[in-house]
Amino acid sequence: VVSDWQTTEQCSRTCGGGEQQEARTIVTPARNGGRPCPGELTRNIPCNPEPCPDNSVDCLVGQWLNEGVCSATCDAGTVTQRREILVRAEGDGRPCPEDASRVVPCNLQPCGKLDFLLASMPVPGGLFAAQL
């Protein structure tokens, strides 16, 4: 005679299907030509078959921010921009872009011309601007 199956280990996974071990003991060994006890005293059985929740997190990056100033005040300079990773991707989430910096054009207006005249004068408001 053998005992009932008893769980001896926790499930190997909390979701998505795992295994756990069960065991039983011989309560009364066979005697006087009786039927022998089954040889299987341990077994692994499936457990926690329910699917795991989707814990995927998409990457999130910040806005492009200028790092320094434009290389020229007119006639097309360049400025380096950087953005930082705010949230890293997890699980099957959308990965972060590889480009964390870029060089973009700036101050595209031609040199040698004034577009606006800005002057400070002692008038109400303190500033005066006029288009030329």
Image: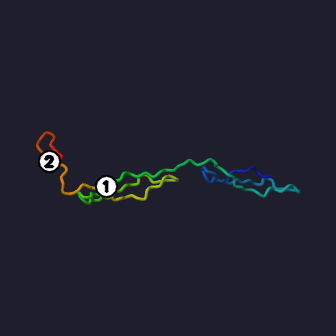
Q: Which residue is mark 1?
A: 66
Q: Nearer the viewer, mark 1 or mark 2?
A: 2
Q: Secondary structure at mark 1?
A: strand
- Where does the image place residue 22, in percent across and percent down from the top left? 70, 53
Specify whether 12 is left or right of 101: right
Q: Which residue is mark 2?
A: 119
Amino acid type for the residue under numbered disc 2: Ala
- Where does the image place residue 19, in percent across and percent down from the top left? 66, 54
Residue at (52, 53) in percent of width and height: 92
Mark 1 and mark 2: span between their CA atoms?
A: 28 Å
Q: Secondary structure at mark 2?
A: strand
Residue 25: which disc? none
Residue at (41, 52) in percent of width and height: 61
In the image, residue 98 above or below residue 131: below
Residue that sits furthest to the right in the current view: 33
- Where does the image place residue 27, in percent across and percent down from the top left? 78, 53
Specify whether 76 is left or right of 23: left
Count neighbours of disc 1 (C-alpha within 10 A) and say few if under 14, some if 14 to 19, many if 20 or more.
some
- Tell me which corner region of the image, top left, top right, bottom left or bottom right, holds residue 121: top left
The first of marks 1 and 2 along the sequence is 1
> Coloured how?
rainbow
Is 26 in front, or is 78?
A: 78
Is 46 in front, or is 101?
A: 101
Residue at (13, 39) in percent of width and height: 124
